[in-house]
Amino acid sequence: MLRSLSIRDYALIETLEVDFDSGLNIITGETGAGKSILLGALKLLLGERASTEAIRGGAKKAVIEGVFDNANEGRLPDLLRAHEIEPDTSGVLIIRREVASGHSRAFINDTPATLDVLREVASHTIDLHGQHEHQSLLRTETHGELLDNFGGLGGLVDTYQAHYRTVADLTRERDDLVEREAELRQQKELIGFQIDEIDRAYLRVGEKEELEAERRILENAERLYEATAALYEMLSESEDALYDRLVVVRNQLQDLARIDASFEDTLGEVRSAEIILKEATQFLQDYNARIEFNPERLDEIRERLGELDFLARKYGGTIEAVIAFREEIGRTYDLAANFEAAISKLNGNIEAAQAKLSKAAYRLSQKRHEVAERIEAMIGVELATLGMPHAQFVVQFRLQEDSGGWIAFPEGAKARRVAAFPAGADLIEFLLSANLGEEPKPLTKVASGGEVSRIMLALKTILAKSERLPILVFDEIDTGVSGPIARRAGESMHRLAQYHQIIAITHLPQIASLGDTHFVVEKAVEGGRTKTHIHRLDEAERAEQIALLLSGDAVSEATLQSARELIQSGRNEE
């Protein structure tokens, strides 16, 4: 549950601290007092984008922080770890948003988090239902999602969508290939020439570097021969050869070492130098003997390097690039040469993928029909409780016939081809008959504002019982209802509060009187500036606030007594 909400320098709020309880938390206040500001701050914790215009004038940044209990249940701990956020062992979850000029930051348990992560985490914690959200019921495209949420069909929807993406990708690949057919056939002759030109060169990675090294040696053969001969002479063959002089040094050190052992180390180093010098001499002699004067080979190398440079300039800049280009055009040539086979293979893959899609769509549709029966029955009960005893709520299913559709639904001995949509084959729409004897019709045509609100409350009630979202926030969901119906709506919320913590912003005394905890939002001028405050009401204050909601103006003893009776009747019903 949401244990506390702290707000600083946000809109009209300078500082605000509010501690919520479990059960039904009621928030009331005059229009413009700041209830929407409170809700806006809460939405920031849920990952809504922030506007710097919301920062209180004169402040550098706005800070909103929510502290949640029991966050060590369900999938939330694993979700936090997946995003490298360490869950608190006591189950406390702290979400903070900071909004400053030009940027905003989010933190979960003091770890920086992106808005996407914040939204994902918050979606497992709070369900916020705004006062205009019930209008979503009038958009047919939301009906399937509501049904899937109620039935917990997310896994089946994910499976369907994975197959849908596979079919879409394969179909797009085939269509692209068909569009390229003429282009491929035109390119085939050119590509064939390029392949032949490259293949005749027998390219090999590293060949150019090897040839350049060999060319350098052949071009400098005379210099190499003269230099190695001169060095060999200097080291070993001249009258004053370096090797002979080193032998004299070694012999003298041997004599000295017999007298004084301290010469042993130096003697060892000279012996090592003697070995190294002897090896160097041998290398020079061998190298000099191997030197080849071969102008024919040099011409071959220069010609080959010219061929390699030509191909590199023409096809990519390097031999490696030419080889990669050859592989690429090879695939294109094979495709052009075997176009019909490629199309046939793709068609086979598409057919197999469509079979899997059809199976997933049919299974999803069957489950949806089962869920729809439960929804119809449960919403019927809730609507009766909310003052619509003769209402009939119907979930209508349609399939769109399509001879070329991706999905084949079994129908007797034949298959029925239907269109595939991103979330399934079903076109789902909620219908309503509000009065006895009337045929159910689309909500958009028959439901009044108050009826839509009651249907949404009924949906939220049954959805909340099936889901385990710990916190539900209702922002004037009672729009369009009053009198006894408002009382029943409040009773429905109160029953729902046995499963979840509920925070409800309302203007109806019938609902406010059923709250377990009651807060009032007020606006006041302090020091020449308008500020919004919220405080918890005690018993006397609560009766006075409900009396004010009843009268809409000044509070009299009669309205106070009515408010007390309203509160007491709610307690008697518990």
Image: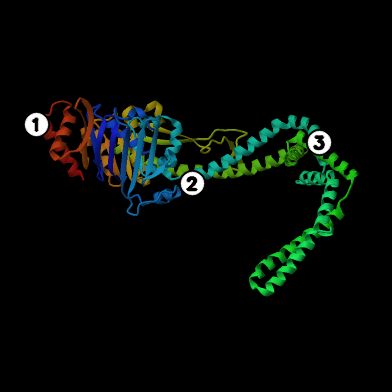
Query: Label 2 is placed on what type of residue?
Result: Gly
Label 1: how many Cα within 10 Å (few below 14, some 14–19, many 20+): few
In space, the residues marked 3 and 2 are separated at their CA atoms by 49 Å
Residue 104: x, y in percent?
A: 39, 35
- Comparing 276 with 400, the one in front is 276
Inspect this view and state whether residue 221 appears.
yes
Q: Is residue 437 above or below residue 106?
A: above
Residue 203: x, y in percent?
A: 79, 43
Asked if the residue under mark 2 is in contact with the one under mark 1, i.e. CB atoms within 8 Å, the reply is no
Q: Secondary structure at mark 1?
A: helix
Inspect this view and state whether residue 372 appears.
no
Q: Which residue is mark 2?
A: 155
Q: Secondary structure at mark 3?
A: helix
State the count of labels: 3
Does residue 568 appear to the left or right of 56 in the view shown? left
- Comparing 385 with 270, the one in front is 270
In space, the residues marked 3 and 1 are separated at their CA atoms by 100 Å
Residue occupying the point 73% across, 36% down: 317
Quadrant location, the C terminus: top left
Residue occupying the point 47% across, 42% down: 368
Query: Label 1 is placed on what type of residue?
Result: Glu
Q: Is residue 151 above or below residue 52?
A: below
Query: Label 3 is placed on what type of residue?
Result: Gly
Q: Secondary structure at mark 2?
A: helix
- Comparing 241 with 191, the one in front is 241
- Which quadrant of the figure has residue 461? top left
Q: Which residue is mark 3?
A: 192
Q: Earlier in the sequence, mark 3 or mark 2?
A: 2
Q: Which residue is mark 1?
A: 557
Q: Earlier in the sequence, mark 3 or mark 1?
A: 3
